[in-house]
Image (cartoon, coloured by chain):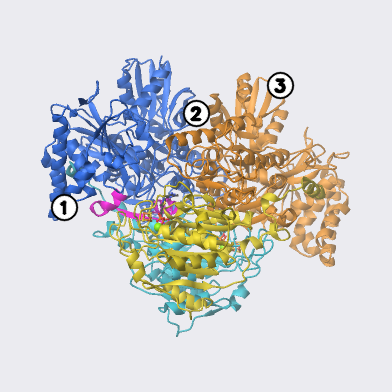
Chain colours: A cyan, B yellow, C blue, D orange
Amino acid sequence: MDWKIYDLEDIDNQWCPGCGDFQIMEALKKALAELELAPNQVVLHSGIGQAAKMPHFMKGNFFNGLHGRSISNATGMKAANPELTVIAIGGDGDMYGEGGNHFLHTVRRNPDITNIVHNNMVYGLTKGQASPTSSIGFRTAVQTDGVFEEPFNPVAVAIAQGATFVSRAFSGYVDETKELIKRAIRHKGYALVDIFQPCVSFNKVNTHKWFRENTYFLDEAYDPSDRDAAMRKAFERAPYPLGLLYSVEGRKTFEENLACYAEDATPLYLRERKTSAVLEFIEALA
Amino acid sequence: MDWKIYDLEDIDNQWCPGCGDFQIMEALKKALAELELAPNQVVLHSGIGQAAKMPHFMKGNFFNGLHGRSISNATGMKAANPELTVIAIGGDGDMYGEGGNHFLHTVRRNPDITNIVHNNMVYGLTKGQASPTSSIGFRTAVQTDGVFEEPFNPVAVAIAQGATFVSRAFSGYVDETKELIKRAIRHKGYALVDIFQPCVSFNKVNTHKWFRENTYFLDEAYDPSDRDAAMRKAFERAPYPLGLLYSVEGRKTFEENLACYAEDATPLYLRERKTSAVLEFIEALA
Amino acid sequence: MNVLPRGDFRDVSLVLCGAAGQGVQTVEELLVQSLHKAGFHVFASREYMSRIRGGNNSTEIRVSRDPVNAFVDRIDLLLPLNQGVRENIRERINEGTVILGDKEELGEELSDTSGRFIDVDLLQKGRDIGGKVYVGVVAAGIVAGLFGIDKSVLYGFFEERFADREEILRKNRRAVDVGYETGGRMKEESLLEVFLPGKGSAKGTVVLTGTDAISLGAVAGGCDFVTSYPMSPATGVLTFMAEHSHRFGIAVEQAEDEIAVINLALGASYGGARPLATTSGGGLALMSEGVSLSGATELPVVIHVGQRPGPATGMATRTEQADLDLVLHMGHGEFPRAIFAPGTLEEAFYLCHRAFNLAAKYQIPVFILTDQYFLDSYYDIHPFEIGHLSIEKHLVESTVDYQRYVITEDGISPRSVPGYGKGMVGTDSHEHDADGHVQEDFHLRKAMVEKRLRKMRGLRQEAVPPTLIGPEEYENLVVAWGSTRHIVEEALERVGRDDTAVLHFAQVYPLSEDTEGYLRKARTVVAVEGNATGQLAGVIRRETGFEITERILHYTGLQISVESVIDGLRQRLS
Amino acid sequence: MNVLPRGDFRDVSLVLCGAAGQGVQTVEELLVQSLHKAGFHVFASREYMSRIRGGNNSTEIRVSRDPVNAFVDRIDLLLPLNQGVRENIRERINEGTVILGDKEELGEELSDTSGRFIDVDLLQKGRDIGGKVYVGVVAAGIVAGLFGIDKSVLYGFFEERFADREEILRKNRRAVDVGYETGGRMKEESLLEVFLPGKGSAKGTVVLTGTDAISLGAVAGGCDFVTSYPMSPATGVLTFMAEHSHRFGIAVEQAEDEIAVINLALGASYGGARPLATTSGGGLALMSEGVSLSGATELPVVIHVGQRPGPATGMATRTEQADLDLVLHMGHGEFPRAIFAPGTLEEAFYLCHRAFNLAAKYQIPVFILTDQYFLDSYYDIHPFEIGHLSIEKHLVESTVDYQRYVITEDGISPRSVPGYGKGMVGTDSHEHDADGHVQEDFHLRKAMVEKRLRKMRGLRQEAVPPTLIGPEEYENLVVAWGSTRHIVEEALERVGRDDTAVLHFAQVYPLSEDTEGYLRKARTVVAVEGNATGQLAGVIRRETGFEITERILHYTGLQISVESVIDGLRQRLS
Ligand SMILES: Cc1ncc(C[n+]2csc(CCOP(=O)(O)OP(=O)(O)O)c2C)c(N)n1
Ligand SMILES: Cc1ncc(C[n+]2csc(CCOP(=O)(O)OP(=O)(O)O)c2C)c(N)n1
Ligand code: SF4
Ligand code: SF4
Ligand SMILES: [Mg+2]
Ligand SMILES: [Mg+2]
């Protein structure tokens, strides 16, 4: 499938020239096209932030919801209609700050969704405050003495919470990012793709160059099914490992655990509830 | 100091006979007394749940706030007056469910507070629904097909987030629990004490007996400063290790990082702001 | 000789009390089921502490040959199963109250009241049978005996539960027998007699709680997705839906917090489900931003709010009607909504059904306001008629050029869902264009605000009118909403004035257009509300300009009683 | 010849527009500072898109010899620095508008408007000096030249910034010179002239934004603890406090979410700090439960709400006044609160100071409602008088038998904090006794509800009365609140009716007791509000029964202009 099928006409893209977000969008469009998914079979969920504007710049069904809540929306959507491909997109502030609790528990719930996080280590849209992943010492107009909080470690937390697909990419490597996204979408269950993404406007520390110099790809020999090894990798900092850190297959998804799909795979909107069933039930009470 | 100094007169304790909460309270009272802390130097913060009722059953300053929010209250309190000993108490639902995001980020912030979690793997006060730490398969009136979510792993998440004191106890071992609480209080920075606690009314799986049979103490040789080892221990399940899993000293606390304490250690309520300073400032603008 | 009912009352009000976890609930169920099976109309209402064990809780059971459905202060027969009877019960004991208690358990506890104490050695009897657990059953046996219920009905209760536990079954039967004998002796010894002759009319009725009625209404309304975070008193609806999730094909999930609850629900709604969220005050407050999201995205959702006293944690297991203002104004920005507040089990069922259709039609959040009293109380009613009910989906199949937010005359844009048709469905929390894409166009903004708010017209036209109970030509009007309906009705009946009517609001927003007319017709209007500030009166004044100065406000944490309403009305009606 | 000001106007309204990140903001600052330094009164107001780069934003700068402080539609001089001028600006161009633009950049872009286009080769001039970045400075130079400002003032601006970067400094000076020359030539060539003779009266004044005034008011009010989660347009207050945290000894923390924000603040309040939370609609909604906690625990907190259009994400960088209902009713249960809505910079400062004392005295949440327009606009004022201001702590030292929630006549219980004295301080979110311990006592419940609500009496007595502007004896009354004050004032001045006054509410809850009197005195009352439902009118009706049927409502996302108010008033005043 030509990935241009995912282009949206007449859009006024709001990202800054040079922003890593463009490359992530390219990787995502290509991944979807290569998986032969038609745009109307794809649902893009996002929150609020620069990253989260993505659904306004590419084709697909979309639900651009609140800051921090898109994985909950995505989980609900997937549960209502497991036939669609559901992707939740947002920034590091969105997913790990405001949305931290949903991140923690969505991992446990394991819906079959792909969670793409544009990790630029800063709040872009609100003009450059620290995000949960900002480095110690990072100075901003709010963090005037520099960040002192220990940076949030999304990959380690995801593994600790039992995620079955935990990966990291860098927007500068479009092909590799695309491949990772494809694997994430194909993975049955919750899949995290944390993507380093330079914010050219507000993060003058973690730049394109910095990410290139401070990352490396996991080698062929690396076994992503070894959780202890994955955890050690997850703790590595500068240089950060890129690729699939951890993955196991076979865990049941959220949707599969729901009573409504125990015997019937039909999406909910296509079902009819018989009032007679309710009547029977009430009469049985008497 | 006699630990009875922490007794409250004329109380109608609302816990069920046989509940592990009693033993945790005993351990806490003893720990405080042995540290020679007077009740009016201690501040007990708690949320909502059976565990969170603790401040109504023992002496001390207390702020019994909302479900899930007590560590934020405690952090604010500590920042307003770093001279006091601040302890945040709650259940597994309170701290890891509703309060999950504050747990994640308070660890990063590192206020000098002690966080005691009564982990009974169930929602006690609301009558027996699954909690984030309930085991897979645990059946309740809501989880009628049994829990399918991966249990929340508080110790692993705390370590992943950079906590500097992560420990686990079992209420049945009062002395050991007391010692751990003492160490946690003495630790400078955020200290987690996750305490297994049998709920005799609603958790018929993880009973006193079960916890005794499914836990063991870390031995003398164990080095709590080794993070990789701690992480491996944190992933162990049944039998679960008890004791201090991970600890490092020396990280600056939240309070120490605040501008207001850069030059002056006085608690905020004792300070006076000079209106003249404001005037000077405004005049300098002209 | 104590004969019940007393005076001119037609029902017997029986109050059981005891510590949590001591089997009081079994006694309650046994009695209610047996009395109902025997043909009596029953009403039962519980008040309980926020604790799992100990303390002292109570259940009022009213028994009558006529339908009965409201909470009264009057206690005809008090059965204190444990010591520690609380002040709220003690205060309700008067000369007419017969207390059946065991001095061994109670000591001198209730001897300082004006009630007539009949000492029964319940503890000894229980021990004789096999332990303290049988005390309650003996007590129930006494009551059953006094009411002349066939023993086999009580036996049946235990047979169902302990079919395969012969020994326990035998002992329970024995406890029933002992109770019966004791009751019989009381009658013989002219100590106590219950005189409710003839058959009750309760045959063919079913006993349901408010929780049941709400839940069944949701099922009838096509609800297929339920998310919640446990919170008293709203957890029952979650439990009901979970219990029957396989039967009706419902997705049920307990979320990590209430923010997830509302966002899971809205995600599901976007996907085409008909979601229900159930919560109480604090949890509701946390959904405030999510409700605003429903407003902006025009995604239907039904939210059940079981009210309890606030602010903050307040009284977790108690009752109040103080979240109307919150529900009406929660969520930032301006968007339409509808709020129901059922007063009867039938209203709970039909309005909950209606809520799902209304939410789907107008693509808005719809609230059902109940409270602890309403949810936990139960009485018998005729099964709901449901042949005429339909589930309206209001969905369209999308074409390639489908646009989600087309501006229309009535404000309603045809709604599709992803996967349904060839088009795509865009949904956005920003101000957006017809495709759902974010746009900073100030004319569009204005048009979209107006489009959304235009739905209020339809909602107002469809608003359920308040129910007038009593004379069409009234001088005085008693305004009530939600759970106080039966209480106010019974109070007015007892006050016995043919110049006074009740106007009960089962929909509190938007108000039906005839509201003002009803109010202006009256000389005196009195509002009865379970809060301290008169919230419905406030809404009425804001919406109609009509000020209700006379108010009977109740905010103790307990439901207002028929007697309190009577007192209040006597003071306020000349 | 185009001469400004035009007609009978006494000020020049200058509008700059350009893409985000293209230096427009520097031009704005340069002009405002220079014009003010030169003695002119200035007012500036920004509108910008929710993006970091690109798009097209604008700033209106009004320059006058008299104080000026309100947003007008009228554009006298338009400086479009980039192409892509948006519709909201284009619509404001009329025959009187002089456009100073470069055809090379704009092409034919503005040639279809009725404005008088003066083509200036800004791009070429910039390139000649050293690059595109100097285009804006050249433009500013032209303006400065037209207004006759001393060049050294502009030089000074750059000297401060580029003290040690000689080359850049030189080029900027050069750009100023080129601009001056160009401006001079325009005058000579009889193309354009600005005629504002004599000195303005702005000497000794300071230019402040709404954000500055709010922040300084907080500092003056003793604020020592600030928590926030970034959210436009309220982030500025956070940034201000962070910037000056060392100077004033303030704890500043950006939290993980708004729920943490309010709970950190309440924890700090419990510990004796004077906390401020700053947020906007969605973040505010998330604090709903926390606000209820403030109500139950009686912990003081000040919450600044920078309003923007909702629902949900709405328009993130735009303005609206649609969160009054939310602020008034947020939080479950019933508890007192106070709400300020300053209309001037002075009010912002003094009311913010007052908010901290009021919160401390009554132990309640106090809200300051502003909006994007108010926060981002700036004008010159005389420095605040602050000698008379005091910081009232309302704290007592605890004795051994201290009780936190003693029931008092005015509802206020003496407050201590942990560590202050020999006693202990208990604080509880449940219904509690005087010690703060949870109690399920129904009489206590009632007493505590009444105690808390009794504070409303004092709050009502202390309420800041609305400001009457205009004749004491009016026929018509224009009601406004918050940020529209100066706009409505100027509109009325221009409408020029001596039978009409403005009644501006800087406190919107509780309403001062004289409110109703003011309203009933008028024959016609018109409400001007930045929302679609008339929220203040709703509150007034609920509180006083007075219905304001005539309304000028504005909800485009932009602030209502003086002209729109004039139009609205002309239509509504006979
Ligand atoms: C409840 C709420 N709080 C705050 C905001 C304001 N806000 C919008 S985006 C954002 C952070 C953006 O950072 P991130 O998620 O990292 O995305 P980025 O812009 O960096 O891609 C914030 C705080 C909001 N929209 N909603
Ligand atoms: C916002 C909110 N949601 C829900 C509740 C209801 N609630 C009270 S306690 C509790 C859970 C208790 O479980 P846990 O924290 O594990 O404490 P435990 O009772 O087991 O000690 C819940 C859900 C609440 N009080 N507030
Ligand atoms: S602000 Fe940063 S993250 Fe946002 S578009 Fe610009 S460069 Fe990208
Ligand atoms: S319900 Fe469980 S946790 Fe709560 S007091 Fe009883 S035994 Fe303890
Ligand atoms: Mg970011
Ligand atoms: Mg628990």
- Disc 1 is placed on an element classified as helix
- The type of residue carrying mark 1 is Ile
- The type of residue carrying mark 2 is Arg
Residue D547 in the image: x percent, y percent? Answer: 54, 25
Q: How far is the residue under mark 1 from the one under mark 2?
A: 61 Å
Position above or below: D190 against C111? below
Q: Residues within 10 Å of mark 2 (few under 14, many from 20)?
A: many
Res. C57 visible in picture:
yes
Instruction: Provide the residue span drawn in magenta.
Output: C239-267
Chain designation of label 1: C
Residue D336 in the image: x percent, y percent? Answer: 55, 36
Q: Which residue is mark 3?
A: D472
Between B101 and D285, the residue placed more toward the observer is B101
Q: Which residue is mark 1?
A: C168
Q: Is C251 a magenta residue?
A: yes
Q: Are marks 3 and 2 on the same chain?
A: no
**Left or right side of B157 for D485:** right
Between B144 and C79, the residue placed more toward the observer is C79
| Circle number at residue B28 | none
Position above or below: D241 against C517? below
- Disc 2 is placed on an element classified as helix
**Residue drawn at 33 percent across, 24 percent down:** C491
| Circle number at residue C542 | 2
- The type of residue carrying mark 3 is Glu
Q: Earlier in the sequence, mark 1 or mark 2?
A: 1
Q: Is D522 a magenta residue?
A: no
Q: Quadrant of the C terminus of chain A?
A: top left
**Left or right side of D566 for A85:** left
Image quarter for residue A249?
Answer: bottom left
Closest to the camera, between mark 1 and mark 2, is 1
